[in-house]
Image (spheres, rainbow, N blue to C red):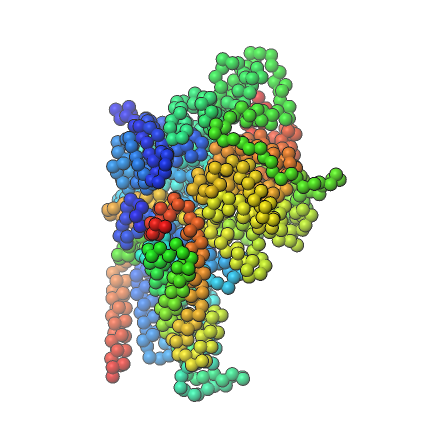
Amino acid sequence: MQRTGLFLERVGFLQRLNPLTKLTGALLLIGAAFLLPTPLAGAALLVLALMPLAVASAVLRSFVDVLLKTLLPVILSLLLVQGLFFPGADPATIMLGPFAFRRAGLEFALTTASRLLIVAGAPLLIFQTTHPIILVQALTERGMPRSIGYILLVALQLIPAMSERAAGVAEAQRARGLETEGGLLQRARGVLPLVSPLIVGALVDAEERAMAIESRAFTAPGRKTWLHDVPDPPVERSARLVMWLALGALIVWRAAVAVV
Amino acid sequence: MPDSLPVVELRDATFTYAGAAEPALRGVSLTVPPGQICAVVGRAGAGKSTLCALCTGFVPHFYHGQLNGAVIVNGQDVAAHPIAELVRHVALVGSNTFSQISGARFSVYDEVAFGPENLGVPRHEIVERVDWALQALKMSHLRDRSPYALSGGQQQRLVIAAALAMRPPVLVLDEPSVQLDPPGTEELAALLRALSQQGMTILFAEHRLEWVAELADRVIALDHGAIIADGVPADVLADPVLRRAGIGWPRPALIAERARREGRWPAEHPLPVTLAGLVEGLAATRNGTHCEPGHQRNGGEGEQGSEEASHSNQVSHTSLHTLALTPPPAVPSSTPPPLVVLEQVHFIYPTGVEALRGVSLTLGRGERIALLGRNGAGKSTLVRHLNGLLRPSQGTALVAGNDTRKTTVARCARHVGIVFQDVRNQLFARTVRDEVRFGPQNLGFPPDQVEALVERAVDALDLRDAIAEHPYDLPPARRRLVAIAAVLAMNTPLLVLDEPTAGLDGAGIELLSRLIRELSAQNRSVLVVSHDLDFCYETLERVILLREGRIALDTRFDALDATAITTLDNDVGLPIEVRLRHTG
Amino acid sequence: MATSTTSQRGGLNSTALALIPIAIAINVVLGQLVQNVLKLPIYLDSIGTVLVGILLGPLAGAITGLIANVIWGFTLAPSALPFAAVAAVIGVIAGYAGQYGAPRRWWLMALFGILTGIVAAAISAPIAAYVFGGVTGAGTDVLVATFQNLGASVLGASFAQGAVSDPLDKTITYLIVWAIVIALPRRLIARFGNLRQQ
């Protein structure tokens, strides 16, 4: 696992945008997927918005790859569970082989799956086109506590190191005769010797890390400097305003339709 | 002139940690002038780390407790200023580099800039500071690399660069050499010297006395929190008070003292603390007298010498117990089967790296083996083949006659015990006793035998007084001894120790050395992976050198010929005694 | 959170800032370790969250859970993001468990584990039902199908499924944290100040 999460080192359209613009866009798309009245709004938005954006940002292949890998099991399960066992009065069924799928269930499954494409796809595209530190800086400059950004970045970078430590613990304890194969009970007995050194060692590390945080004056009061700029040109600010207005309009329109 | 003013000044400083019964520092008075390199030596738990933390404000601001006396660093009263202010005056660099990399930045350049960013330094000045710090540490070419993609030595330089970017006039390092290999320590010494020439004051705590002798302008020895010696290295490091306190002497002093007893070092000459001093002194003596060079330097000499050294090196308060470990299993009078046999072992990691390229090796009973090699030579991979943690991609590995492909690690663990370098991966129990019990219990010894093994292992590593303590409440050096005891108690015919001397004080190393001899006398074998060549030379017999996944050398220390010595020197360097023989 | 010199906005001192990222990494890594090495049928992906809650209090626990989910989205599956609120609540409950002194008794920890499991099931059910249509793509979907077949609504079946599997996983999580916390060296317990004196 790389230390920058899903981020891909590519040059393209989304990579040049301010993260706030991308986040606003994602919010608008997710809102639209839930609020637009057609059941396949999400699928349409994927094809008409997310995929062209992925192409323009040179990440289409891995975008589709990760999206399928994370969503395919969910969507299949959705079709099976809700198609076969959807609770509801509508008795209409569609026979597929020996299975009687409920029509209402399949509709529900398709609507949900279509929304999921956007709920998972929009953040995925942001993560693939935004270096974590740019995202954190943009949000921190907008008022997110510095500590939150710090924790996010450090956690991202610590995961690979912690994985190595976990492998080291497993080696050390197996070398002491810990049996990690065998029956369920046998393996369950191995949980503490494997989990404990990792955590106690991590807590001891935490003390040293806390000293390092103080050494680097992270907790010092006063103004801070950012070494780099995250550009936010006026055109992006206007675009964000337009997107917020569109989202607002969408909500008002849906509310009005629901009342009528 | 500010030159005359001390940069670090402690007046009668006494500190007791919250909840502790005894003070960790007692009446320490110390003045360090600008530009001095001042070393602090002492046994584990003598107060070295506390002194480092005190000079940087972590005591009493991070580690709380009762502080009496005055501590002034660069004109700042440490007790009266928070750490966030003190960082502009003094920087602390610890031994564990990994936990000192912030993790909040993704390149070396940005990592060094992180501190000044937090101080709100204007951007153009940050750029100046970072450029200067990277240049001072000769790592400008690494500026775009991820901090986590650096080698251990480079990471240490990064941590120092990050500290220097805060522009402190004083640098404090707590055991900076623990994680470094010999080239790494040499690099660090050159760097610290260069910084001191630029006027930086440096205070560092350290166990490796040979390194201290080469580097420091001044040495302070601590014992039970009090200063017992203070002066130039030549005086302090050969002061008998250091040996009485269990700190020991650097090897050149020990060797010269032995030479003095043998009449090869004039009684009126002071004992040398550096290798250069020793070579010079021996040469001068040889020219003055008619002593035949090489006359007494037969093969076993180094070992006998160190044996004498350790007998004379009295450990003040520890009593070394007789190591009445389990008698060796009855060996049939016919040739016993070897413990481990590797035949043409190749190993390729899933990443495609071929770490072993045809290693054949037989480890027998009662052997004392050093496994040497540069970082990346394949030592770790080889060790993991000794108990089936890794299985050969090609060739076979037999542990006690069983092919590791057809058995489990847990079964191999009856024959081969491994203590890995990172002790934290091993320790998890509430008490030393429970920790030591875990291994033999896993191996299925009957309860009374488990207890007997635990007791013996605890005594063998001098942990009797700590048996009910939490391993993590002990100083780091003793934690390593606990880890060794925990594997020793498994009573395996082969014990493998990965960097066992890292962070140990003189007394701990001596304890280990005796243990290894005892084990081999009981027909058990010990294999040591180590950068500490002197320890290997003094304690072990057989030497195996790995280079690029192949065995470059497999011989005995007392049978090293000129070719073997050159081979060894090229890859890992030479033990002091061999170097002496070679150059002298 | 009593030990360090400087605290800052968000109420996190340097000890919390150091521990929370480590705990998040533990969440991610331990799940893998337990499943890959021991192949046990539990997840244990909130050990770090519960540990921080117990050691540092509700706020730190909530932040750990929240960011752990964002990290999960950042690195593996963006579809985990909607459940961030659930993870935050798990951390908050663990914080109160620590303040209550639950680690004194194993059965108190087990009770908190069950409680956490039920609360987690209750909060995640609407998210699971509305956003994911009740399924996750894992084996537990069989339970959802069964409950719906027995006449439950999508929301009801989601909750019932969670109420069956979450308390078990959270109880085991709490018991592991219990075993670790009672075995911590005194020095560390003193530094992580949320635990009531035992």
Quarter location, residue A244: bottom left
Q: Residue furthest right?
A: B334
Task: Identify the residue shown where x is 60% and y is 14%.
Answer: B291
| x and y, in percent, of residue B400 in the image | 67, 46
| x and y, in percent, of residue B561 in the image | 65, 29
Q: Nearer the viewer, residue B158 or C10?
A: C10
Task: Tell how many labels.
Answer: 0
| x and y, in percent, of residue C113 in the image | 40, 62
Task: Identify the residue shown where x is 40% and y is 29%.
Answer: B222
Q: Nearer the viewer, residue A56 or B387?
A: B387
Residue A170: tell me if it is visible.
yes
Quarter location, residue C122: bottom left
Residue A75 vertical position relative to residue B562 in the rendered view, above or below: below
Residue B58: tell me if it is visible.
no
Task: Identify the residue shown where x is 52% and y is 25%.
Answer: B313
Residue B93 vertical position relative to residue A38 in the rendered view, above or below: above
Residue B6 vertical position relative to residue A235 in the rendered view, above or below: above
Q: Residue furthest bottom?
A: A91
| x and y, in percent, of residue B571 in the image | 56, 35
Q: Nearer the viewer, residue B527 or B298?
A: B527
Task: Identify the residue shown where x is 56% and y is 52%.
Answer: A178
Left or right? Give the position of A237 relative to B331.
left
Q: Nearer the viewer, residue B124 or A120?
A: A120
